[in-house]
Amino acid sequence: MIRKIFSAALLAMMFFLAQNVSAAPDISYRVHVQDVGWKPPVGNGGIAGAIGEHRRLEAIVISCDGIEYNAHVQDWGWQGWTPSGNVAGTVGESLRMEAIRIRLRGRYADSYDVRYRVYVKDSGWQGWVWNGEVAGTTGQGLRLEAVQIEIVSKNSGRHNRDRYDRDRYDRDRYDRYRRDRYDDYDW
């Protein structure tokens, strides 16, 4: 009798836990490329764009439950936040995307992060950024040529000090460059 009660309680607890654990959201995204049009969609971690073809990204559509994104567009600046499945950027206006921000909202935001990086003209791949941070450049006139997006669990192990150390190293290197180059001038 005790065995049956214990088994029933264990089964109920496993059912309850299974109901509260949500699987990672599926993500797919596609980009509109200069002189090519819409490229086929890619999934989690895929590269969308035209690396090495010297073509600008003009628009992006991301499909994922609970995701929002916005693009910094040539001559326009930042557009408003766009929900899943809608176009960020422009189509048919020959304007380049220069930066993008992506974030998760709703039920997935507590358990998952979105990380992404972009390939920038003359710079190559930038480092990974997370949850609404800016990927790309603003005010420099540099086009995006590709984007890579991943949905990762907050407990995945991809969150490590490594990325913060790299970011700090890049900032320190830039500060040294700026100091060496401009501190000799009398402004």
Image (cartoon, grey):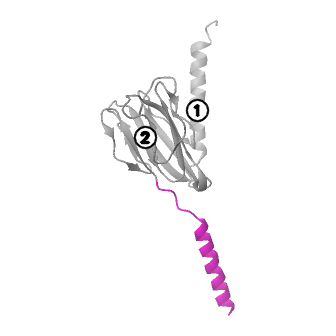
Q: Is residue 118 visible?
A: yes
Q: How many marks?
A: 2
Q: Residue at x 62, y 54 (%)?
A: 110
Quickly name the residue at label 1: 169
From this view, report whether residue 156 is shown above or below residue 103.
below
Kind of residue sitting beneath label 2 = Ile
Q: Residue at x 52, y 38 (%)?
A: 70
Q: Secondary structure at mark 2?
A: strand
Residue 9, magenta (yes or no): yes
Q: Residue at x 30, y 36 (%)?
A: 36
Farthest-out residue, left? 36
From the top left corner, tell me how far across and down residue 51 is, in percent: 35, 36
From this view, report whether residue 83 is shown above or below residue 19.
above
> Which corner quadrant holds the C terminus?
top right
Q: Residue at x 66, y 89 (%)?
A: 3
> Which secondary structure dominates the residues rendered in magenta?
helix
Cα distance in 3D space between marks 2 and 1: 31 Å
Residue stretch rendered in magenta on the structure: 1-26
Residue 2, magenta (yes or no): yes
Q: Which mark is residue 60?
A: 2
The residue lying toward the viewer, choosing from 69 and 122, is 69
- Place residue 53 in its image quadrant: top left
Kind of residue sitting beneath label 1 = Tyr
Farthest-out residue, bottom? 1
From this view, report whether residue 72 is shown above or below residue 141.
below
From the top left corner, tell me how far across and down residue 29 is, in percent: 42, 47
> Which corner quadrant holds the N terminus?
bottom right
Report the mark closest to the observer, 2 or 1. 2
From the top left corner, tell me how far across and down residue 25 is, in percent: 50, 56
The crowd level at tag 2 (other Cα within 10 Å; few <14, some 14-19, many 20+) is: many
Q: Is residue 32 left or right of residue 64?
A: left
From the top left corner, tell me how far across and down residue 132 is, in percent: 57, 41
